[in-house]
Image: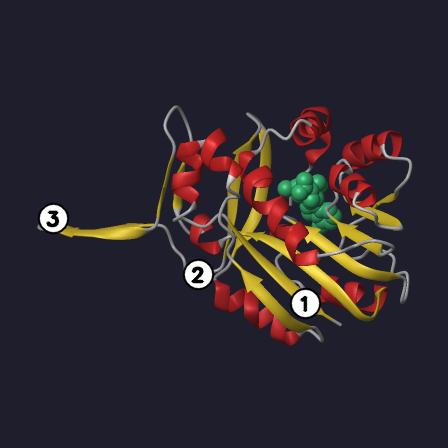
């Protein structure tokens, strides 16, 4: 779990000013492609942060957007900035269910903060109208299964080297585990790594039908604006996008 409240202003400024290339060039375009035409749809957004994506959904034509996040600092910003949406400060595992109220639910980069998914899945299922769509974006397990070293230099290694001195293993893809990390120069986050088969097990345990799963590459614009990023992530995945249906 992470408490983004202490970093709410910085988080909001980064999101609003589109500073994350991973989000702007890969994750958000892939989520928006998965949800398709949202005109006149009622949308529930889990882990909505400071509400930037809720506002984008309204601008894309959604009729009504309700965002949920557990960080009070972020929800305070969202309520102040985006008055065309509604928000509540809740945990997505225990949040209030508004039965049969939404056509779509989006959980963008939040599910990996919770170890078990069924209580959230059950709430989303009840909140959606029949035929409703649930789109989740996750850190790709290949990325977070890797050994990540942050600092002046950055590395993310998954694999092994075998030589005369023995074997050196980098990362652990197959075993589910909690990862402790530090972002934004001080925001302590804990999230869960699990393999694609563990993720699919969670989905198959739920009542939802899996419609599609994708491992998106960067959009073409990234090639011009950040060629190195484009080259890396045209080969190494960052995100996994799942689309489920009620
Ligand atoms: C990586 S941010 C993503 C925010 C937003 N969806 C976006 O893409 O910009 C993850 C968000 O999930 C929220 N979060 C983490 N665990 C949560 C939980 N159990 N219930 C509700 N929100 C949670 C955090 O407070 C944070 O705002």
Question: Taking 218 as reference, is 116 left or right?
Answer: right
SS for dot 2: loop
Query: Nearer the N terminus, badge 3 or badge 1?
Result: 3
Q: Is there a contact, CB below 8 Å, between mark 2 and mark 1? A: no
Residue 239: x percent and y percent?
A: 53, 51
Task: Determine the image quadrant of residue 206.
Answer: bottom right
The N terminus - image quarter: top right
Secondary structure under tag 1 reads strand
Please tell me whether residue 59 is drawn above or below residue 154 in the rendered image.
below
> What residue sits right under mark 1 in the picture?
244
Who comes first in sequence, dot 3 or dot 2?
3
Measured as percent of width and height from the top left, residue 114 is found at 64, 54
Above or below for 45 versus 174: above
Rendered residue at 64%/75% (across/down)? 205
Q: In this view of the protein, which residue sits in the foreground, 225 or 146?
A: 225
The answer to whether the residues at label 3 and label 2 have Cβ atoms under 8 Å apart is no
Compared across the picture, whether 36 is left or right of 175 comes to: right
Query: Who's the residue at 82% across and 30% down the image?
Result: 77
Residue occupied by mark 2: 175
Residue with the most extreme left position: 164
Q: Residue at x 63, y 45 (%)?
A: 28
Q: Is residue 198 visible?
A: yes
| Colour scheme | secondary structure
Q: Cα distance, mark 3 to mark 2?
A: 26 Å
Q: Between marks 2 and 1, how big is the CA–CA gap? A: 25 Å
Occupied quadrant, residue 232:
top left
Task: Name the quarter where the C terminus is drawn.
Answer: bottom right
Label 3's element? Answer: loop
- Residue 181 at x, y percent in the picture: 52, 38
Which numbered tag is attached to residue 165? 3
């Amino acid at each position: 779990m992470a408490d983004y409240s202490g970093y709410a202003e910085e988080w909001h400024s980064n999101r609003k000013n589109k500073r994350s290339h991973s989000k702007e060039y890969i994750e958000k375009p892939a989520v928006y492609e998965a949800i398709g035409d949202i005109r006149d749809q009622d949308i529930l957004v889990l882990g909505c942060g400071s509400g930037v994506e809720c506002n984008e959904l309204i601008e894309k034509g959604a009729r009504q957007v309700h965002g949920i996040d557990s960080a009070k600092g972020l929800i305070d910003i969202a309520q102040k900035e985006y008055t065309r949406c509604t928000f509540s400060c809740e945990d997505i595992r225990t949040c209030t269910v508004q039965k049969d109220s939404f056509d779509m639910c989006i959980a963008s980069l939040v599910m990996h903060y919770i170890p078990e998914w069924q209580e959230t899945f059950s709430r989303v299922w009840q909140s959606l109208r029949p035929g409703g769509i649930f789109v989740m974006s996750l850190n790709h397990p290949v990325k977070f299964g890797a050994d990540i070293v942050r600092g002046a230099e950055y590395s993310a290694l998954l694999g092994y080297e075998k030589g005369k001195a023995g074997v050196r293993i980098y990362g652990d893809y197959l075993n589910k585990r909690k990862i402790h990390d530090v972002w934004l120069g001080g925001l302590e986050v804990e999230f869960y790594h699990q393999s694609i088969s563990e993720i699919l097990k969670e989905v198959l345990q739920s009542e939802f039908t899996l419609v599609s799963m994708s491992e998106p590459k960067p959009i073409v614009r990234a090639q011009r604006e950040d060629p190195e990023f484009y080259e890396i992530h045209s080969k190494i995945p960052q995100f996994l996008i799942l689309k489920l249906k009620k």
